[in-house]
Image (cartoon, rainbow, N blue to C red):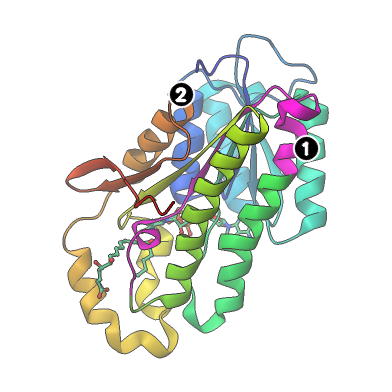
Amino acid sequence: MALSGQTAVVTGAARGIGRAVTELLLQHGATVTVTLHNAGHVVEVALLDVDESAGLSLKASLDQQHGAQRTLFLLCSVESEEQTKAAFQKTVETFGRVDILCNNAGVLNEAAWERSVSVNLVAVIRLTYMALEHMNKGTGGRGGVIVNIASMAGLGPLPSCPVYTATKHAVVGFTRAMAAASTALGYGIRFNAVCPTFVQTDLFSNIYDRMGMFSQLAAQTRKFATTGVLNVSEVAAGLLELVTDETKNGEALMLTGGGKKYMTFPTLS
Ligand SMILES: NC(=O)C1=CN([C@@H]2O[C@H](COP(=O)(O)OP(=O)(O)OC[C@H]3O[C@@H](n4cnc5c(N)ncnc54)[C@H](O)[C@@H]3O)[C@@H](O)[C@H]2O)C=CC1
Ligand SMILES: CCCCCC(=O)/C=C/C=C\C=C\C=C\[C@@H](O)[C@@H](O)CCCC(=O)O
C-alpha cells in the first residue's frame, strides 16, 4: 500500500517507538499536515500523547525537517474515552479520513497494574473500535490497516512482569481475532501486531524499578535482555512492513536482535 494520500493516527507518538514510527512515516512521504483538506499526494498523521512538552518538542523538530504543515500534535490520554473520541474527531475534521492506526502507547508498572491494563489493553480496544467507525468499508469507510505494538512478552511469559505479559498476550490475541472478524465481515481493514524484544527507550530504562512484588526476578530478565536490545528504528521498520504489505493480515511479527520472524500459531479447529 502506498502511503501517499493516507491519514494515520499514532498513539504515544512523542517519544520512543512512537516517535520513530512517526518519523519513518514522514520520511516515506507520510506527511503530517495541518491543512484543512487532504493535500492529495501526501500522508497525514495525527500524533497523540499525554506528554505535552515532548509532543510539542517533537513537532518543532519535525517542522524544521519537513515544514510546519507536516505535523499535528494532539494532547490526548488513550485512557480517556472523551479525549480519544475528540482526537479522532479532530483528525477527521482536519484530514477527512483515517486509514492507518498505530496503537503504540504503552506502560509497564507491576505495582500499578490496573494502569498497565488500562493503557496497554483497554485503550487498544477502545481506539480500535473508534477507528472502525471511520475506517470500516461496511459503514462508508475506505478500509485501511491497524498495527498494534505488542511485545515478545505477548508471545512468551516474562515472570518478572505477569500483568504486562498478560496485556501483551491479550493484544496479540485481539489483533488476530479482529483480523479474522474483519475478513469475515468485510471491514476492509487489516490488523497486525509487532512483537519486539527489548528496545532502547525510556520504558526499557525503567523496567527494573517497575516490577513490584516480582522484583526478585529482575536478574533473569536482565540476563535475558543481554540477548539483544533493538533500536527504535528497527521497530518502526517492522511496523512499516506491516502497514505497506497488503498481504499481511492477522500477523504477529517478532523482532529480535537475530532478525524478524512471522509467528505461526496452532490451529485449534
Ligand atoms: N521498550 C521496549 O523494550 C519495548 C516496548 N514495547 C512496547 O512499545 C510501545 C512503546 O513503548 P516505548 O516506546 O518503549 O515506551 P516509552 O515510554 O519510551 O514511550 C511511550 C510513549 O507513550 C506515551 N504514553 C504513555 N501513556 C500514555 C497514555 N495514557 N496516552 C497517550 N500516550 C501515552 C508516553 O508519553 C510516551 O511518549 C509500548 O506499547 C511498549 O509496551 C514492546 C516491546 C519492547
Ligand atoms: C521486562 C519488561 C520489558 C518491557 C519491554 C518489553 O516488552 C520487552 C520484551 C522483551 C522480551 C520478552 C521475552 C519473553 C520471553 C519469555 O517467553 C522467556 O523466554 C524469557 C524469560 C526470561 C525471564 O525469566 O525474564
Q: Which mark is residue 244?
A: 2
User: What's the residue type where badge 2 is placed?
Assistant: Thr
* Residue 143: x %, y % from top left: 65, 26
Could you classify mark 2 by the number of other residues whose Cα lies within 10 Å: few (under 14), some (14-19), or many (20 or more)? Answer: few
Q: Quadrant of residue 115?
A: bottom right
* 204, 147: nearer the viewer: 147
143 left or right of 24 in image? right
* Residue 150: x %, y % from top left: 45, 53
Image region (quadrant) for ligand 2 = bottom left
Q: Is residue 121 magenta?
A: no
Residue located at (30% from left, 89% from top): 216
| Element type at mark 2 | helix
Magenta stretch: give its range: 130-158
Looking at the picture, does residue 28 appear above or below residue 61?
A: above
253 left or right of 48 in image? left
Residue pointed to by mark 1: 133
Looking at the picture, does residue 210 appear above or below residue 264?
A: below
Looking at the picture, does residue 161 appear above or below residue 263?
A: below
Task: Give the number of the mark in front: 1 or 2.
Answer: 1
Q: Gap between marks 1 and 2, in whole Å?
A: 22 Å
